[in-house]
Image: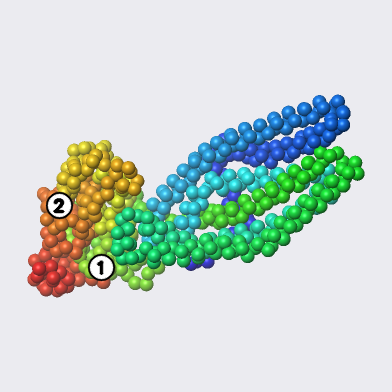
């Protein structure tokens, strides 16, 4: 893991300022209310304490027969109740404002995160450092609104400590300074604990990511059959326990290490409170202070200690989040995928791959080496080769997700690096073996997502389902195309087989009706006869340019030209019959299927 940068005080303060600034830009009224509320939350309890103390004093005098005290004690009781009601009402309003602000801020910040993540340079999705930063930044984005609330609590605690100490100083400066000094040991211990826990949390980012993936696998119905049949339950649970020990148990052990110092700090605060109260009692007994002064001092000391502890606990919880804000800022500065500004106006007559080589960032060798080929409009091209030969990488280059390390890819006379990649993608249909399962929604949406930019057409939907050999099973579902597709999410949902899911993905491609279709092992879960009918429809009338990656001879033999990749280079090309006749690399790769 890369060494984590240590935040300076200036960076931490700057981070808090950014939280406040962004929150204010999203919900200015709510932020203003929260800041005003911080002052109210700090002052109201002290005012209530003051009147409670005066009530006690006047009550004693009224018990002794003072008529004036009787009226005063009633007044102070009424005022104490009023302030209590105001505090309760304020807390209710504050809770509503806080929840509303949390929703608005969290929605805006998390949307910015997702949008940024989905626009990064494509290689970053396979880069561990990027994923670590993204994980921590994501945690920050989800808890952004809570951080601002914590910031307002900090302000409230600071004001509460300061006002409590000032109120004590009015009574006795020495007592105020004595109590203030007693707060520092506990604050220091808590601060050190929060620093250690935050450091540990950052060092175990990848551990928590592995826990998340493992727990998802343990609870996802698609994996349960294999887990149980292979007897993996205990092994996976043991692995989860090991990871939890590395992450959560370590944090608990860190907390255990500071218990002696925490007990010492608590003892210092307790002694300070005890000494202060004994001193006040002696003052009252000596008739140097009214009896209500006991309540006044006891409440103020307790308020000062609790607010100081609350302050440092908030700082402790924010230490991690402030560090995450640093990662959030770093993440938001990651370069986005670079795209040109030339709009693709028409379907290109030729896609020209000219002497293209490609090396993944951080890799030691090229995945593709001096690859050259031309794909004509309406041509059916197959790209074959062993796993790791560079087939899928070549597809990513053609789609513009990666740019060549050297050489060029041209759409007619336009270099793809100069093209607005969004305008290029409008002409592409893409289906890979690891296609998306949109199982949070319905059959209809799974197909319609192929072309969300145009008005929905029921006729197009039906035709797409028929072309993908999916119409028959969809028509038998409880709600046909409107049937939800996950039993664990929807009460009336259904679970599809792998072949059915693949047909829906193909239907999505047919619904898109793109002039250029790229298929990467598109029919691995579909029987050969259904596959033949599907490809007949794809190839029908030579209306589309089709680029296919497949290990099925029945799929690729229909191609106009086949390119054989080996170790990132084109070693053979030609029609199926030509390559068979050569008895070269292609023949030996498909020998078992040819002879079968």
User: From the image, which quarter does the C terminus lie in?
Assistant: bottom left
Query: As displayed, is residue 352 above or below residue 488?
Result: below
- The mark nearer the N terminus, 2 or 1, is 1
Residue plotted at (26% across, 56% down) = 432
Q: Can residue 169 be seen in this view?
A: yes
Whether residue 375 is visible, yes or no, is: no
- The residue sitting at 37% across, 58% down in the picture is 218
- Left or right of residue 524, residue 576 in this image: left
Residue that label 1 marks: 387
Instruction: For mark 1, give the secondary structure.
Output: loop
Q: Name the residue under label 2.
A: 534
Give the quarter of the image for residue 90: top right
Q: Position of residue 171 (x, y in %)?
A: 83, 43
| Left-right relation of 230 to 178 | left
Q: How crowded is mark 2: few (under 14 residues within 10 Å), some or many (20 or more)?
A: many
Q: Which of 348 and 45 is in front in this view?
A: 45
The residue tagged with tag 2: helix, strand or loop?
helix
Q: Classify 32 as above or below 158.
A: above
Residue 351: numbered disc? none
Circles 2, 1 touching at the beta carbon (< 8 Å): no
């Amino acid at each position: 893991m890369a060494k984590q940068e240590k935040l300076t005080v200036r960076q931490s303060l700057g981070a808090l300022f950014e939280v406040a600034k962004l929150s204010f830009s999203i919900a200015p009224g709510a932020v203003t209310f929260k800041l005003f509320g911080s002052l109210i939350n700090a002052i109201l309890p002290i005012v209530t304490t003051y009147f409670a103390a005066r009530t006690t004093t006047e009550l004693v005098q009224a018990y002794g027969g003072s008529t004036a005290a009787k009226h005063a004690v009633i007044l102070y009781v009424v005022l104490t109740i009023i302030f209590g009601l105001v505090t309760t009402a304020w807390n209710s309003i504050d809770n509503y404002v806080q929840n509303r602000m949390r929703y608005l801020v969290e929605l805006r910040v998390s949307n910015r995160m997702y949008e940024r993540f989905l626009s990064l340079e494509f290689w970053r999705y396979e880069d561990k450092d990027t994923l670590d930063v993204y994980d921590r930044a994501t945690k920050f984005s989800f808890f952004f609104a809570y951080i601002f609330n914590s910031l307002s609590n900090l302000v409230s605690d600071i004001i509460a400590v300061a006002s409590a100490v000032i109120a004590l100083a009015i009574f006795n400066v020495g007592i105020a300074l004595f109590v203030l000094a007693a707060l520092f040991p506990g604050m220091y211990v808590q601060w050190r604990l929060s620093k250690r826990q935050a450091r540990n949390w950052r060092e175990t980012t990848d551990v928590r990511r592995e826990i998340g993936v493992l727990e998802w696998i343990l609870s996802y119905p698609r994996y349960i059959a294999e887990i149980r049949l292979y007897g993996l339950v205990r092994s996976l649970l043991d692995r989860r326990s090991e990871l939890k020990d590395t992450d959560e148990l370590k944090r608990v052990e860190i907390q255990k290490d500071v218990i002696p110092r925490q007990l010492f700090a608590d003892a210092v605060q307790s002694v300070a409170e005890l000494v202060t109260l004994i001193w006040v009692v002696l003052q009252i007994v000596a008739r140097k202070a009214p009896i209500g002064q006991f309540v006044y001092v006891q409440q103020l000391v307790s308020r000062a200690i609790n607010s100081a502890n609350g302050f440092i606990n908030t700082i402790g919880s924010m230490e991690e989040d402030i560090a995450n804000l640093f990662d959030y800022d770093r993440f938001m500065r990651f370069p986005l995928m670079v795209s040109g500004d030339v709009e693709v106006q028409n379907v290109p007559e030729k896609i020209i791959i000219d002497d293209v080589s490609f090396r993944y960032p951080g890799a030691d060798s090229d995945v593709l080496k001096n690859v050259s080929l031309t794909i004509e409009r309406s041509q059916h091209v197959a790209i074959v080769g062993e796993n790791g030969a560079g087939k899928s990488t070549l597809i990513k280059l053609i789609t513009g997700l990666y740019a060549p390390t050297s050489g060029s890819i041209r759409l007619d006379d336009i270099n793809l690096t100069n093209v607005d990649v969004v305008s290029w993608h409008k002409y592409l249909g893409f289906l890979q073996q690891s296609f998306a399962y949109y199982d949070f929604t319905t059959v209809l949406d799974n197909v319609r997502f192929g072309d969300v930019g145009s008005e929905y057409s029921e006729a197009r939907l039906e035709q797409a389902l028929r072309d993908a050999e999916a119409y028959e099973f969809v028509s038998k579902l409880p709600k046909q195309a409107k049937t939800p597709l996950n039993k664990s999410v929807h009460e009336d949902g259904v679970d599809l087989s792998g072949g059915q899911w693949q047909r829906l993905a193909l239907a999505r491609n047919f619904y898109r009706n793109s002039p250029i279709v790229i298929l990467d092992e598109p029919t691995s879960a579909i029987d050969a006869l259904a596959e033949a009918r599907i490809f007949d429809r794809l190839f029908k009338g030579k209306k589309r340019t089709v680029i296919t990656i497949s290990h099925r001879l029945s799929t690729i033999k229909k191609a106009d030209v086949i390119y054989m990749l080996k170790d990132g280079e084109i070693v053979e090309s030609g029609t199926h019959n030509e390559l068979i006749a050569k008895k070269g690399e292609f023949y030996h790769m498909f020998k078992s299927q040819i002879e079968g």
